[in-house]
Amino acid sequence: MAELGVISLEEAKAALDKFWKPKPRDVYVSFSHAIGRVSSTEIKSKIDVPPFDRATYDGFAVKASDTFGATESSPIKLKLVGRVLAGTWPRMHLRPGSSVEITTGAPLPRGADAVVMSEYAVVEDGSVNIYRSVSPWENVTSRGSDIKKGQIVIGRLKQLNLLDVAVLAAIGVKKIMVKDRPKVAVISTGSELVEPGAKLRKGKIYDVNATSLSESVRACGGEPVFLGTISDRFSAIKAAVSNGIKIADVVLISGGSSVGTGDLTPRAIATLGRPGVIVHGIAMKPGKPTFIAVVKNKPIFGLPGYPVSALMVFDQLVADYLHELSGIPRSRQSVVQAKLATKLLSARGRQEFVPVKLVEKDGQKLAEPILKGSGAITSLSTADGYIEVPLEREIVEEGESVEVKLFRGCSLV
């Protein structure tokens, strides 16, 4: 396989754009499985909610005009002609001078336009004494007062939450069309890796990327499918990537991307189909060994093995594509201005992303670089955000004003 030159992050995305573009799919799901999904179309209610005038409280359905003048000392007596329970339909027609006992949520009988609450009425010998007057439609929830028939209740491309699902239930919608969750095959490579929980033998380390990348995929609205920790063998890597292409929309593979004798992964992918590897080497730090391939119209992102490098490359390169596929908008990244706490040296010709911790000192906000290296996952867990050092910069001086891009909640994505 011919070696490809190192290019900028923007150039890498442009190269991928020539061979693959994310195409979101629509799928129907039950409303009970819609939370977190993004609606593909707007939803209009086919009914009024509530579908009938109903009592807001337990009490007595009346004609409001029959109660005018009622007081504690001078109650008005109305004939009691029946009872309406929630879930039943009243057959009577309320006539002047009469009343119907009614429970909360029950439909108002024809002729009634208000409800006297139970605490202001007393039943006596087939009649009810009303001790307080009510105005028309008092203590009544009117038909369509919550949702009108034809009203748009869910907009297009709305990420659905618990309340949205409750609204769908209220209008009787059982299924809704949403953006499908992209399946993402996650593969870790490295003969030195073992799964967390296994016995850690000499020369071995626990696999961090399987967990961190899978959770990053979920944060973007994707569905991770972990295909295991693969040893550094050409045949094993080829088989795992081939499987990922068959079952997933996107393939993520960490490790095995560095140029040299261990450069197995790009060579294995090159045998799976054209165009194969289209980018190998991105001018960013951490993340220079990153590669991008396309096989059978499926993108394959080869991330560095070091956890910090893998996560930063995912954040800068992969996350936006997954957000587009899932329809879930990427949260807006917060930015703060700070002074650099110490002088920072950077490699010219590489866009560098440096984790920093924000501290207050003498009334100033300072950004302290965390320079543990891309193999130390704690360099991210203890950081508040990161600063970008442009390709052309070699030195950022102490005290220089920098823009700190804050991590989004507990995730980079």
Image (cartoon, grey):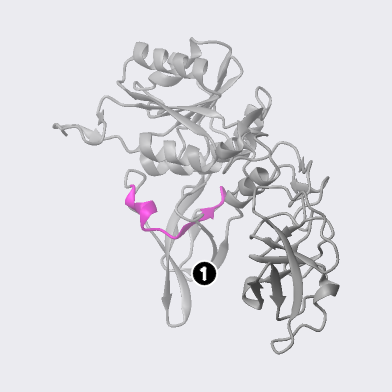
- In this view, the residue farthest toward the bottom is 73
The residue lying toward the viewer, choosing from 333 and 262, is 333
Is residue 335 visible in the rendered image? The answer is: yes
Question: Total number of numbered labels?
Answer: 1
> In the rendering, at what x and y percent does residue 192 appear?
24, 28
The residue lying toward the viewer, choosing from 242 and 25, is 25
Q: What residue lies at 33% left-to-right and 52% top-to-bottom? A: 378
SS at mark 1 in the image: strand
> In the rendering, at what x and y percent does residue 350 appear?
51, 44
Q: Is residue 312 left or right of residue 152?
A: left
Q: Is residue 242 left or right of residue 66?
A: left
Q: Quadrant of residue 117?
A: bottom right
82 shown above or below 273: below
The residue lying toward the viewer, choosing from 119 and 360, is 119
> In the rendering, at what x and y percent does residue 145 appear?
78, 58
Judging by the rendered image, the residue that carries numbered circle 1 is 338
Q: Is residue 16 magenta?
A: no
Q: What residue lies at 85% left-to-right and 62% top-to-bottom? A: 95
Magenta residue span: 377-392
194 shown above or below 144: above
Q: What residue lies at 50% left-to-right and 10% top-to-bottom? A: 272
Is residue 2 visible in the rendered image? The answer is: no
Q: Is residue 199 left or right of residue 105?
A: left
Q: Quadrant of residue 297?
A: top right
